[in-house]
Image (cartoon, grey):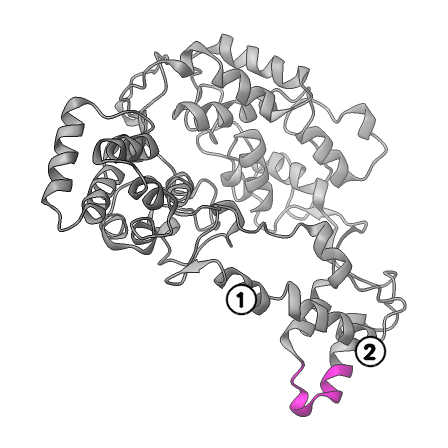
Amino acid sequence: PYIDNTVRVFLGTQVGCAQCHDHPFDNWSQYQFYQLAAFTAGTRTKIARGSPGFEKVNPAQKFIKEAQAKYPGGKVPGAMQRMIRANSYQVSEVKANLRLPHDYAYADAKPGDVVKPEVLWGEIPSTAAQRTPRQQFAAWLTSSENTQFKKTIVNRLWKRLMGIGLVEPIDDFRDDSECSNEEVMDFLCEQLVRSDFDLKEILRTILYSETYSREATDYQVTSGDSYHFPGPVVRRMTAEQVWDSLLTLAANNAMPFQRPTAAEIAPTIDIDFSNATLATIEKAAETFGKTYAAAAYQRSLRTHAYQGVVLCRASELPSPSPGSHFLRQFGQGDRESINGQEDTANVPQILSMFNGPITHVMLEAGSSIYDNVVSSANPREAIEAIFLSVLTRRPSSDDRSIAASEISRAERPGIGYGNVIWALLNTKEFLFIQ
């Protein structure tokens, strides 16, 4: 599956069917699939003989057995076990041949034949000619000469901003796939190479275009009609965008912490098995248990929680979130499939907006929007603050009249302000990108 996933993500092409037989709807053969997979044959993901500290047995297993003999009942602390096992993973390569499966049924080869690595199109870049097969595969995949790589990046970024890709579906390019604007695709691909694949530069180019600045229109891919981009497409915000938008209204500090980088964690958890002892591992595990281990990490998250919900940007939260979390209810992907996120409406979303913790916290004293509104000099100023905060526009005369009426009927102004805020949060104007 990793070959199919890699090609699908980076090249926008689905070759998975060819793993078992020639692709029924495209030009990929089973033999081509195995040729591509042959680049990564022999890739090992665990330490082996020849690795530092690996003598007669795996050092990770040796230290775990040593610890089991020391601790009562053989119960090694979980943080120590995880840290030791994590250090037993290492990507390396060994010489290995990939052979066709025993049920291979095509005339171009026989079952069990050795398959030599070959790319799907183009050539391996000359700069990678003397490198390992896996490195050659990566060099070809991401080469500036690989047209499909460039198109896939551009198409994904275009869809992210416009709502619809220049080619749809974005991960199923075929020979007969229609591009709604070849000139735009070619231009952005040229800019991508010119900027040395600077994605921010491409995003900036699209955002400054007249096309992006036009009013959004209603369009569905399933309509069967080509879309020539009179403007972006009206679409609901992603789960992460909705969450971060609400968080900005609720929290004075929307990013109270950032997830540690690999470079920050490495000094704590890296083990050099060639000179490690159980004593040094125990000392490191103690530090790991107090800092980056799961229990410690969850404790740190809870210090920024409201009713059990951590108030932090989606990018800093564990992904995927639990099934009951706001992010999952609004369609966050489960990371078990590519493009697994959803933007369809459902009842849990309504309940989350109606009485979920993230909605409640912004209607209480201490939240950014609530404190800003109640500190207003008068209801007129408060209504304007609400509309600017939630919808980023000033209220119309009708908006102002309806909001003022709602506030006047409430037992006290704070409740009325909360009702207006809640009503605006549930409008399409807030939830949809227009």
Residue 87 quadrant: bottom right
Residue 134 quadrant: top right
Q: Position of residue 24 (x, y in %)?
A: 45, 33
The residue tagged 2 is: 279
Label 1, secondary structure: give it. Answer: helix
The answer to whether residue 236 is above or below residue 44 is above
Circle 1 Cα neighbour tier, 10 Å, few/some/many (<14 / 14–19 / ≥20): few
Label 2, secondary structure: give it. Answer: helix
Given residues 37 and 233, the one toward you in this image is 233
The residue tagged 1 is: 299
The answer to whether residue 315 is above or below residue 188 is below
Relative placement, left or right, of 426 versus 291 is left
Relative placement, left or right, of 275 versus 258 is right
Magenta region: 66-76
Residue 396 appears in the figure: yes
Q: Position of residue 408 (x, y in %)?
A: 12, 41
